[in-house]
Every structure is written in structure tokens, then in C-alpha cells.
Amino acid sequence: MVAKWSAGITAVLANNGIIDSNESEIYAYGFELMISTVLNALVIAIIAILTNTFLFSFAFVVCFGMIRIYAGGYHAGSHLRCFGLFCIMYAIILIAESTVPVQWTLFVGAGAVIPAVFVIWKLAPIEDENRPLKERERAEFIRKVRIVVVWQAVVIMVLHLLMNALAVRWLGTLATGMSFGVLAAAISVAAGYIKNVGKEERVC
């Protein structure tokens, strides 16, 4: 269903000259990831309202989604299974966030972001077996995902420094949400990489 939606959106944009028809596959793949992320975001928004973690959840979804569009990551057998796994991961992250004392947010943020940036920089983008990337597409995705993840890491560090300097707690909540978003994207990338390597070994 998600694949059909993304193909339909791409076709409309290409037919109206909004995007280059030669790059339709790139856009369709990006829209597919975007739609999947939006659906996840809607569920997270509901959970955030129920658990009073809206700011944290907003920061998490924005960072995760921006990276996911270009980095790809683990793909389950269906979007429903992907959705279920994402919800489980997010529930674990919410539990972890609720146990982090305010004074530890800088250390937790740095501990999450630094290895996450390294993983994404080295491994992304992760190809889906149903949608292998062409060389030009891969180069473009690498460039964009590295820009996004470095920019996010800088913003996270600035927010942590501002929180400590100004003693404004919500800045720490925002930074922690972004940190966990980057970490979740890195976990998805690493899982996707391991899955692809395992398939290659079985083929050999």
C-alpha cells in the first residue's frame, strides 16, 4: 500500500513537470520512506499526548525521519512488521528517557550521538533488496545523509550547552529527543547492514 502511494505521488509530480522523470525512482523510494515515517509519527504523536512527552517525541521523530529518508535502514518483510518493530523500539526509548536524570542529559546525548554519527557515516545508505540503488543515487544519498547527521549532531551539542548555561530544562528535553532519534536511525542502519551482509553470505 505504501509503495503504491509513493509511486502515485511520484507519477503526479513527474507528469506535472515538478520533478525530473528520469529521477522518478529516487523520488518514489524517498516518498515511500517518508510516508512510512509519517505513519509512525502519527502513532508516536498519540503516544506522546497520552504520556505527556510531546516535545521529546517531536524532536525524536524529526531527527529519525530526516536521517531515515536518505539512510534507509532495516526493512522487515512488510510495512506492518516495520511499524510494529518501530513502536517497540520507541517504547523502549521512552522508558530509557524517563530514567535519565536531567544532569546526565549531556553525557547521555554525547554517548548516543557520537557512535551513531560514526555508524551512519560509515554504513549509510542501506539498500533494500527490492530497491537497489544505482551508483549515482548512492553517491547522492551518501552526501545528503552525512550533511543531515552532522548538522543534527551540532544542533544537539549546542542545545546541551545552552541548557547548562541558561538552566532551561526544555532545551535538554529537546536535545535528548534528538539524540535518541539519531541513535534509533543508527540502530536501524546497523541492523539493515547486518541483514544485507547475512543474505550475501548465504548466497555465496
Image (tube, rainbow, N blue to C red):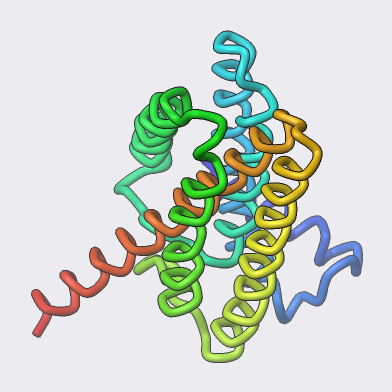
Residue found at the far top of this picture? 50
Where residue 72 appears, as percent x and y from the top left, is 49, 62
For residue 35, above or below residue 114 = above
Q: Residue at x 68, y 74 (%)?
A: 147
Residue placed farthest to the bottom in the image? 135
Foreground of the two, 106 or 146: 106
For image coordinates 66% across by 57% down, the residue present is 157
In the rendered image of this protein, does residue 99 appear above or below residue 166?
above
State left or right for residue 119 relative to residue 149. left
Front in this rendered view, residue 124 or 83: 124
Residue 101: horizontal and vertical position, in percent?
A: 49, 29
94 vs 193: above or below:
above
Q: Position of residue 81 (x, y in %)?
A: 34, 37
Comparing 6 with 172, the one in front is 172
Q: Foreground: 184 or 138?
A: 184
Who's the residue at 70% across and 43% down the image? 164
Residue appearing at x 90%, y 62% in the figure: 16
Quarter of the view holding residue 50? top right
Number of residue marks: 0
Image check: 16 left or right of 103? right
> On the picture, is 152 further left or further right than 187?
right
**Picture quadrant of residue 96:** top left
Residue 32: percent from left, percent from top: 58, 53
Vertical comparison of 126 with 170: above or below:
below
Q: In the figure, is residue 112 to the left or right of 138?
A: left
**Quadrant location, the C terminus:** bottom left
